[in-house]
Structure formats: structure tokens, C-alpha cells
Image (spheres, coloured by chain):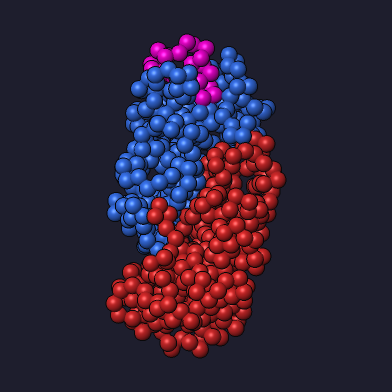
Chain colours: A red, B blue
Amino acid sequence: MHEFDLIARIRARAALRGDVVLGIGDDCALLAPPAGMQLAVTMDTLNVGVHFPADTVPYDIGWKALAVNLSDLAAMGAQPAWCTLSLSLPGADAVFLDGFTDGFLTLAKQHDFALIGGDTTRGPLSISVTAHGLVAPGSALRRTGAQVGDDVWVSGTLGDAAGALRQWQQGDAMTPVLRERLDRPIPRVALGRALRGLAHACIDISDGLLADLAHICNSSGVGAQINVDALPASAALREAFDVATCRVLQASGGDDYELCFTAPPVQRDMLHALSQTLNLPLTHIGEIVTGTGVCCAGVDVAAAGYQHFA
Amino acid sequence: MHEFDLIARIRARAALRGDVVLGIGDDCALLAPPAGMQLAVTMDTLNVGVHFPADTVPYDIGWKALAVNLSDLAAMGAQPAWCTLSLSLPGADAVFLDGFTDGFLTLAKQHDFALIGGDTTRGPLSISVTAHGLVAPGSALRRTGAQVGDDVWVSGTLGDAAGALRQWQQGDAMTPVLRERLDRPIPRVALGRALRGLAHACIDISDGLLADLAHICNSSGVGAQINVDALPASAALREAFDVATCRVLQASGGDDYELCFTAPPVQRDMLHALSQTLNLPLTHIGEIVTGTGVCCAGVDVAAAGYQHFA
């Protein structure tokens, strides 16, 4: 396969939208953003061996490359619109490409997310995606709005992906439910959009709860007090690890792609109702307090948060 | 340096614009596109050893990574607005990062192009950029508009970057003027914008004149007849190579980042005047004809056009 065959193969399967004037196939895509809306833009890259194990199936690589970007749109409360994809491949492998495209476009379709362009190049396996969402002026969820007295909440369960990664690093078999969380994260797009007007601040958990909540605290000029016993855990995580390890994974493991947000206590009923509507656990895990930093007794905070180049 | 220090180092130097509501530092950037304008979006990746020699200086890597994306905006006649940058680095190297950022932001500043977000990850050296431009509805230059009887034009000189690459591949010293064309291409942004309303079709030359002109022909359902003796060459190229090699480099060498466009003969005077205004050679190199493909007697067309995965 040549480069142009690769592109044609992807292009043939990419769905469009009414606001895509020109999709894949020219020097640029052309888009007609709806009047009065702001654009939310994010870009994330996954490299083999860094962001996913080398034996990850192509479908899951495609899924995850898109999911981590949709998760950033979710954290802003934005409606997914368009994305571009740059794919660096060691060679032209039709089986890989078809599997990758399956995973990528299956998730895209769920969110009416149009693939409008990108690049294919030769190089070590690496995937960059730029995601564009739409949000009304003033309604985006930001990291800066947390207020003293806010409740701190998280969606879903924490630590599952990190649990799978821990098993992999130890040479153990990965628990299928945990590996699914690592390979096929679910971006909380509907939740993010529902939180506009309810939450004061929001972030998606990619580097670990404590590290990401610390971003909210730093940006908002506040501190946070977390109750480690309140952190939600899946049954699979509890089965696979002892209590102390569970806590570390929940508090500091990366790749959750859940949302962490703050909201005033007056919103508790609304948030419980939202949890029912979305069929997604929302758990009150602590409070925003005066001061700086995140306090979470019972976990070795120093170990928290994945850092590249650390 | 940690990942967040890397980001802070770039963020401190990134200039903003009035339409950037929120730049680097949250889950997404927020942008306020001007009412009634369309967005032109493109994404290109450069990998070490594939798109630039490993010994390229960091300044030039930063410059080129942005230039190839600006060149795609130029080819559509779009006004540069915002970009995102994903940088994969083997390690956190402040000297590399500062040089890279110098080159990237120096070129960005020339075009009032705001760096609004992105990603830094660990991995083999690779740079992905997504570029956003603005263009009025219906005015973008596309590949599809070439008409039989149009003149074919190119800007600047051809084959210089490919000449430098050829010298490097042969183990020869690179002629400085040619290497500058390889390492620091000039995106023809002002030309692209001036061609709106004059040109019928346009593309930037990244894969070589014949390959890229073939894209115009395929998209427009026409053929092209090129006069090889009319192809513009720099004095440096003529000095460094014999006539036959010059021709191959001009017709099929990649990395020119000049614009190739078609326009009706009635526009010749306007285009000569534009060439004067921009102080940039514009050369009439052939005609659009009925049929398919690009005919260029005197050059081995089969050798034309760089393809990844070929």
C-alpha cells in the first residue's frame, strides 16, 4: 500500500457532518462553525510503549487515541464536532490500519465526530489527534472556578486502568475488566455537557486523581481535602489487589479518563439525579478548602501522578 | 525538567490574539472564530530521519514543523490564526526545547499565528502541528477548479531542497543556500491569499511538482502539459548539479513548499504585477489540457514524487 492508498482507505469510511464544507483530500479541510459558538481545541499523542503496551490490538489503539481527546472535550463541557488524525506507522499494514480505523471510527460515530483530515507518515508507531468541540460562550468548564466549600466529585470508578498496567508491569495476566478500562476508556462526554451550570471546575483524570485535582487547586487558588475511603473502586480492582494497593491505584493511577469536578453542596440532589439519568456513578469524595495542595490521608501522595520526563 | 516545566517554558513565550479566549493550560483551548468565516484546518507531522536529517539544528526543526503547516494554509488562501503542537521527545532537553521554540515562534510571529495548546510526550523525536486558518466562504483555493486552457504557474524556484537532500544522501557537503531551503522553507502565505479570485486551483509542492500537480489534475478531471525548460531554478542548484539532474530535482524533488496554481491566460498581467509586489518569482510553466495526467517531456516522470511506504 502507498501513502495515498492508506489515506483513501480511511477517507472511504469517514463520516461527515453538515458543517463540514470540505473533508479529507485537499490541502486543508474547510469547516463552517455555527454562529456564536466558541471552539474548544485539544491535541493528544499516544506513543507505543509509553501510552499503550506494544501488544495492544489495533482496534483498541484507534479507540484510545480518540477517547483521550474526547475526554478533554468532555472536561470542558464541549460538544464534539471534528477531528484530525496523524498516524505514524513503521510500515503500511492493511490489517493494522483496518483494525485501527474500526476502533477510531466506531467511537467517533457514537459522538457524531467527523474525521476531516490529517497525515500519514513513516516512523515509530505514534498517533496524534486534534479534537474540536463546540461550546456556548461563557459555558465551558474550566480548572479555575473551584470555590472553598465546594464538594469534590468523581465519575465512575478509579484505578482500574492503572491496575491493569500494574499487572502487566509485574508480568501477571491482566484481569479482562481492568484491561478493558486501560485499552478502551469511555470519554464522559454526556456528563461533561450536563455539568455546565452545575460544576464550578472540572478536569479529566489522565495523570491520576491527586495530580489532576492539584491542577484544579493550583488554577483556582484553593486546596482540597480528600476522603480516601470514599474513592470509588470496581469489584474487579478490589479482587485483584489488597486495600493499600487499591488506594494508591485509585488516588494516583493514570488513564482513568473519568471526570473530577467541584460543585457547591446545593447541587447534590441534582448530581444524584444526573447520576441516575446517565447510569453513571457520581461520588462525593471530598471538599475544596482554603490553602494549597491536595490532602489525602492514607495514601503516599509523593508517589502520585505520572510525569513524562520525571 | 518535568513535563509541566516543558509546557510552562513554551507557554511563557507563546503570543496570543484577541480571538483566543483561553490559551495553553486547561483541558482545551477556547477560541472565538469571527462570524461568517470558514475554518481551514490541516495537520502535518515531521519525524526525525524521515522528514529531516537527525543533525538538523533545533531552531530549524521548529521552523520547518510550522512552515509545512502554514504552507497548507497558504495553498488554500487562508489567513493563519491558531495552531496546536504535539512534541514527542526522547528526553527533556532544555537546549533543544529553547532552540526549537525559537524557530517555531519566530515563524509564528511573522504570521500572527497563536500557539494555543498541545501535548508533550516521551518518545522518538516527532512533531505534529495542527494549523487553523480563516477564509471567507467560497473563496478558498481548492484542487478541483483547474480548467482546460489555464496556465500552470509556480512560485519561487524548484528543486533546491531536494538538491540539498541529494548532496546529503551522497555524503557530500550541502551547499548552504540549498540547505537553507531544505531546513527553513518559506510558506507562501501572502501569495496564497493574493491568489483568491485569480487562480482556479492551487496546491503546495511538498511531494514534488509533478506529483502535486497530478493531484490538481486528478481532482479537476484534466491533464497538464509542462515545459521542462521553463521550470525555475536557482543559481545554486545550477552550479551544484548537471542539467539532467537539475531537471529531475526540479520536476520531482520534494520539500519545495512553493505554490503550484492554475489561472486563465487573462490573468497573466495581474500575476506579473503580483510577482513584483511580493518580490517573488511567479513562472508560467505549462498549460492545463484535456485528458489525464501530467506530461513533461525530458524528465523521467516515473521517478517523480516522494511516497511514504512506497
Q: Nearer the viewer, residue A263 or B195?
A: A263
What is the x, y in percent for residue B23?
37, 59
Residue B128 in picture, x, y percent from top left: 47, 46
**Side of A140 where A158 appears, left or right:** right
Q: Is residue B300 left or right of residue B261?
A: right
Residue under the image location 34 percent in, 37 percent down:
B59
Where residue B165 appears, as percent x and y from the top left, is 46, 24
Compared with residue B134, is residue A206 higher up or lower down, i.e. above or below?
below
Q: Main secondary structure of the magenta part?
A: helix
Outermost residue, right side = A95
In which quadrant of the rendered view does residue A187 lie?
A: bottom right
**Which residue is drawn at the image coordinates 38% and 16% (left, top)?**
B235
Q: Residue furthest top?
A: B242
In the image, is residue B181 part of the stretch drawn in magenta?
Answer: no
Say above or below: B215 vs A184. Answer: above
On-image quarter of the N terminus of chain A: top right
Give A53 or B169, whichever is nearer the viewer. Answer: A53
The one nearer the camera, B203 or B206, is B206
Relative to residue B96, is residue A90 drawn left or right? right
Give the x, y percent position of residue B279. Answer: 34, 28
The segment highlighted magenta reads B229-253
**Does the image show residue A203?**
no
